[in-house]
Amino acid sequence: MIIAIDGPAASGKGTLARRIASHYGLHHLDTGLLYRAVAKAVLDAGYPADNVAHATAAAAAIDPEKFDESALKAEAVTEASSVVAAIPQVRQALLDYQRTFAARAPGAVLDGRDVGTVIAPAADVKLFVTASAQVRAARRVAELQGRGVEADEQDILADLSRRDERDSQREAAPLKPAPDAHLLDTTHLDIDAAFRAAVAIIEAVRTGRKRG
Ligand code: C5P
């Protein structure tokens, strides 16, 4: 079984994807880490994030086994990730890895922006997870504070909006729900309620029931 979970920044899709993967015994890939790793490599080498040649070379050379997740969550890397992600050659270089991962037995949950539209268009279940920008910003602030990082909610809101805009407006694999994606708005749901709602959708699809 392949489950595709897409949505804007800080929508809760990562937490949801991990829980769903563990619930069903599937592999999990946070595809955002791939773009973050490319961004970090380009910045570390001293180039601007929109340097196509260096970003493409970095994408071809990344090794997900060696990812340091906390370094990939740094603010400068976050901002640059959506810049490298708009480069079609970067997306192309990361495609095989993601498709191979999705094909691993017994199945996988992938979360990102284009999983249901480009990476795994034949996924068994597609979820598009959203939440209001205010709620997403508040969640991101709480997450940062949990890691001991001080953050201003208005700054975070501006960062999220800028990244969403870039991700939605780009030509290469823009952020948008696949036509057959199930929308899950978590604005008023905590993680347990969001998980239950996601499992209900997955079970409904699996048992072939029609949902309104
Ligand atoms: O999911 P996360 O916020 O970690 O992703 C970081 C950035 O990577 C996003 O803002 C987006 O530009 C890019 N991305 C993407 N396609 C994906 C996953 C992430 O373009 N499938």
Image (cartoon, grey):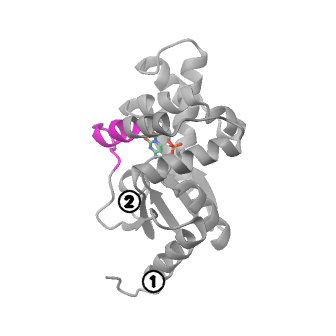
Q: Secondary structure at mark 2?
A: loop
Displayed quadrant of residue 190 = bottom right
Disc 1 under 8 Å from ligand 1? The reply is no
Can you say which quadrant of the picture contains the C terminus?
bottom left
Residue 11: percent from left, percent from top: 48, 54
Tag 1: amino acid: Ala
Q: Residues within 10 Å of mark 2 (few under 14, many from 20)?
A: some
Q: Look at mark 2 in the image and give the residue it sits on.
A: 121
Residue 188: percent from left, percent from top: 46, 66
Q: Which residues are magenta?
A: 163-175
Q: Is residue 169 visible?
A: yes
Magenta span includes 172: yes
Can you say which quadrant of the picture contains the N terminus?
bottom right
Kindly report which numbered mark, 2 or 1, lies closer to the viewer in this rendering: 1
Counting residues from the start of the chain, the first of labels 2 and 1 encountered is 2
Count up the numbered dots: 2
Q: Which mark is residue 56?
A: none
Residue 59: percent from left, percent from top: 52, 30
Q: Secondary structure at mark 1?
A: helix
Magenta span includes 103: no
What residue is at 35 percent from the left and 83 percent from the top? 211
Q: In this view, which residue lies farthest toward the top?
A: 46
Tag 2: amino acid: Pro
What residue is at 48 percent from the left and 30 percent from the top? 79
Q: Is residue 196 above or below residue 55?
A: below
CA–CA distance in space, label 2 to label 1: 19 Å
Left or right: 34 in relation to 50:
right
- Choose between 176 and 110: the one closer to the eye: 176
